[in-house]
Image (cartoon, helix red, strand yellow):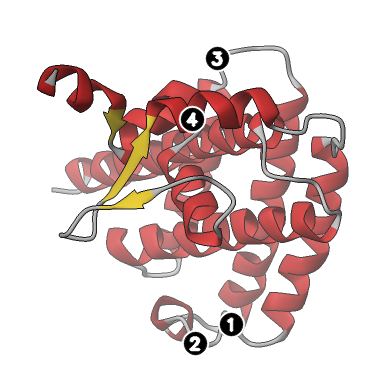
Amino acid sequence: MADRLREDWLSLSGAAALIGVHPSTLRLWSDKGVFPVHRTSGGHRRYLRGEIDLWIKTSDQKNVMEPASAMQSAVGQMRIQIAEGRLEAELWYQKLNQEARMQYRLSGMTLVHGLMNYLSSQDVDASSEAYVLGYDYASRARRFGLSSIDATQAFLFFRNSLLEALVNAYEDARVPPGLAWGKMLNKIHTFTDQILVDLLKTYQAFDESHS
């Protein structure tokens, strides 16, 4: 009986795997109160399998927002964020001259276009697209004297700004959290994680060639 009860409760990663979304997406839904979650005495998130099954069955899939439309809205929000000075608060950005700052602002749009190509493509393997973007971020950072840590922080700034803007776009369109856009966010996380890995591999290759 005790074993059965333990099987009914899932961790954040276990519940995310069950419904097919990234743990970050499920964490966001849980914190916003749109996905049933319980807390242990230590503050850890736990999910009841029966509640997950019910949520999947009742998740409203009728109100759908196309990825291209969501991206367009997100681009507008990202430009507003940049205009409001969020970039200027980043320590890595403060190390750059005016030319470098202009190129980094454009790199946010490069990431958006790469994601749009990936989401609209039927190809499961997007390794070449991810490699090009990772190499681009790494080579730009080295050209302007940034460390691998700075380059990582720069990429994460644009990646996280885009994810935040996408979530806001869905909320503004009153699209309820569900598997349709949860799986899209999962694809975005997977793709951008690969870009980050390629960025770090490129930095390592540069360092080894100059050692």
Instruction: Determine crowd level at label 1: few under 14, some 14-19, many 20+ residues with C-alpha closer than 10 A.
Output: few
Residue in the picture at 64% in, 30% down: 179
Report the side of 157 relative to 78 (left or right). left
Res. 2 visible in picture: yes
Residue in the picture at 57% in, 27% down: 54
Q: Amino acid at mark 1?
A: Arg
Q: Amino acid at mark 4?
A: Ile
Cα distance, mark 1 to mark 2? Answer: 5 Å
Mark with earlier residue (3, 1): 1
The residue labelled by disc 1 is: 86
Q: Quadrant of residue 125?
A: top right
Cα distance, mark 1 to mark 4? Answer: 37 Å
Nearer the observer, 176 or 80:
176
Vertical comparison of 203 with 47: above or below: below
Residue in the picture at 60% in, 26% down: 56
The residue labelled by disc 4 is: 52
The residue labelled by disc 3 is: 125
Q: Quadrant of residue 69?
A: top right
What is the count of numbered marks?
4
Nearer the observer, 33 or 27:
33
| The disc label shown at residue 89, or none | 2
Image quadrant in which the N terminus is located: top left
Q: Amino acid at mark 2?
A: Ala
Instruction: Determine crowd level at label 3: few under 14, some 14-19, many 20+ residues with C-alpha closer than 10 A.
Output: few
Residue in the picture at 41% in, 43% down: 196
Mark with earlier residue (4, 3): 4
Mark with earlier residue (3, 2): 2
Helix or strand or loop: what does disc 4 sit on?
A: helix
Question: Residue 5, image x and y in percent?
Answer: 21, 25
Cα distance, mark 4 to mark 2? Answer: 40 Å
Mark with earlier residue (4, 2): 4
